[in-house]
Image: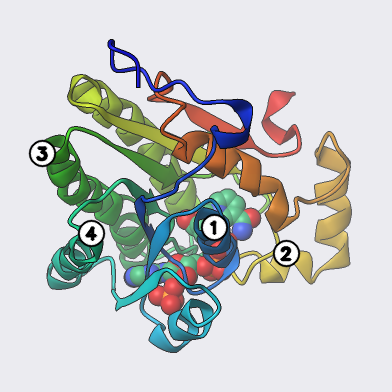
Amino acid sequence: MRADGVEVRGPGELFSLEGQVAVLTGASGGLGHRFARVLHEAGAHVVLAARRKGRLVDLAVELDRATVVECDVTSDADRERLIEQALHVTGRLDLFVNNAGISLAGPAAEQSTDDFRRTIEVNLTSVFVLCKLAAAHMVEQGGGTIINVASMLGVVAATPVSDAAYAASKAGVINLTRELAAQWGREGVRVNALAPGWFPTEMSARLFGDERSMRWLRRNTMVGRAGQLEELDAALLLLAASSNSYMTGHVLLVDGGWTAR
Ligand SMILES: NC(=O)c1ccc[n+]([C@@H]2O[C@H](COP(=O)([O-])OP(=O)(O)OC[C@H]3O[C@@H](n4cnc5c(N)ncnc54)[C@H](OP(=O)(O)O)[C@@H]3O)[C@@H](O)[C@H]2O)c1
């Protein structure tokens, strides 16, 4: 660490999370599973949160620094317990990844108000509350990093994969990220958004299972194909790395060029 507080690391150490505690929501499958392995491999102790505890336990047995917390991100009590359990590890909270999300797709005319509200609750309101809870500790300890998993569908329309609630929630996550970065920047808390394109998970299974949809996907993606989960590793580590201390309020699109045209 230099006298001006800037951490200078060699290329081999730039993305190390050695000694850090990283909380990850939505760790029971899909992108979350992959993110957990990547953060762990970079040296972090990972705190894995989701509702399906069995899946978290199965993942945790493969990792030597992992804590499992059964958590519904829409529950106040669960959110507070998640932060408490994370602080139990070493008393620090270095990285918080808001990855849990849902999509209850359907044309707007048929999407119920309840489904819209539920999507906003899981994808946006919970992110806001968890950011606040995490940042309170990060400010106290002198800094920390938050990554909100948005989507390229927070930047462009989703149709023909119609989901107004999802598109609105992810656009909300993107500007929430910018606003929180502005409010907390001087207190050492960086807030960035990772905005993936199309990746094969439970959430996108219907699209990936339909050849006509896949042809449309390949036609409209600059690299001519869907993403593979490993193709998010570098972007995740870039946002997570404390060496990346001058990047905040950023939205990192990893979408094979979908939004670039
Ligand atoms: N796949 C893509 O192409 C894609 C593209 C852009 C953005 N994303 C975003 O990436 C994130 C991960 O999505 P995915 O594709 O990996 O989907 P997924 O396989 O369906 O995983 C969603 C995760 O969110 C968790 N979750 C859902 N509701 C929750 C709740 N109320 N409380 C706690 N956890 C909850 C699920 O765990 P439990 O069910 O066990 O609680 C699961 O671990 C989401 O925010 C999604 O919007 C995905």
Circle 4 is placed at which residue position?
90
Task: Classify mark 2: helix, strand or loop.
Answer: helix
**Residue kind at label 1, given as amino acid type:** Phe
Please say if 205 is above or below 224: below
Q: How crowded is mark 2: few (under 14 residues within 10 Å), some or many (20 or more)?
A: some
Q: In this view, does 69 lie to the left or right of 65?
A: left
**Could you tell which of marks 4 and 2 lies nearer the N-terminus?**
4
**Could you tell which of marks 1 and 2 lies nearer the N-terminus?**
1
Separation of marks 3 and 4 at Cα, in angstroms:
15 Å
Circle 2 is placed at which residue position?
207
**Could you tell which of marks 2 and 3 lies nearer the N-terminus?**
3
Q: Nearer the viewer, mark 2 or mark 3?
A: 3
**Could you tell which of marks 3 and 1 lies nearer the N-terminus?**
1
Q: Are marks 3 and 1 in contact (CB under 8 Å)?
A: no
Q: Nearer the viewer, mark 3 or mark 1?
A: 3
Circle 3 is placed at which residue position?
140
Q: Which of marks 1 and 4 is in front?
A: 4
Separation of marks 1 and 4 at Cα, in angstroms:
21 Å
